[in-house]
Amino acid sequence: MQEMNEFLQLENELTREPMAENERLLSANLQALRQRNIQCEDLNGELSQLQFEKRSFHEELETTKSRAGATQLELRQKLADAVTEITSLHHTLRGLTNELHSALNDQKPQKDKESQQVERRHPSSSFVDSVA
């Protein structure tokens, strides 16, 4: 019986060492898993924050695009109005130029008639005027 006790005690000691080693490994693994879990929670928090920022930036981008589109439309309308105004002014200027040319042409024959009438009234009396 003593042999049996010694055998069981020896077997008990032999199984305790691997079991203790397994317990240390399991404890180390558990600690590593807890640290990874904490890191994962931190990363999930950062991910949530980044997703929120992404949504905010996307909304800001859409707002900016909308304002840019409205501004572009407004500028196109102003350009169209300016082109219309320039065209109108060009036509007005063309009409005034035509009227001015017409008035100048009308004045030219009158001046020619007036200069002819002046020459008829004042015949030249000098020899030099008659030669010319």
Image (cartoon, rainbow, N blue to C red):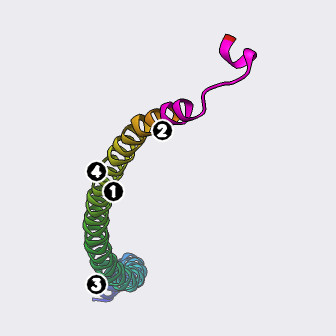
- Residue picked out by circle 2: 114
- Residue picked out by circle 3: 4
Residue 91, which numbered label?
4
Marks 4/1: CA–CA distance: 5 Å
Residue type of the residue flagged with mark 2: Glu
Task: Give the extent of the magenta segment.
Answer: 116-130
Q: Nearer the viewer, mark 4 or mark 3?
A: 4
Left or right of 23, for residue 111 = right
Q: Quadrant of residue 109?
A: top left
Q: Secondary structure at mark 2?
A: helix
Q: Residue at x 39, y 86 (%)?
A: 38
- 47 within the magenta span: no
**Where residue 37 appears, x then y in whole percent?**
34, 83
Q: Residue at x 39, y 47 (%)?
A: 100
Local crowd size for mark 2, using a 10 Å CA cut-off: few (<14), some (14–19), many (≥20): few
**Where residue 116 appears, x then y in whole percent?**
49, 30
Residue type of the residue flagged with mark 3: Met
> Compared to 111, does 65 lie above or below?
below
Q: Residue at x 42, y 83 (%)?
A: 35
Q: Secondary structure at mark 4?
A: helix
Which is nearer the N-term, disc 2 or disc 1?
Answer: 1
**Where residue 125 appears, x then y in whole percent?**
69, 24
Q: Nearer the viewer, residue 12 or 126?
A: 126
Which is nearer the N-term, disc 4 or disc 3?
Answer: 3
Left or right of 107, for residue 90 = left
Given contact means CB atoms under 8 Å apart, are the residues at marks 4 and 1 in contact? yes
Marks 1/3: CA–CA distance: 123 Å
Left or right of 68, for residue 124 = right
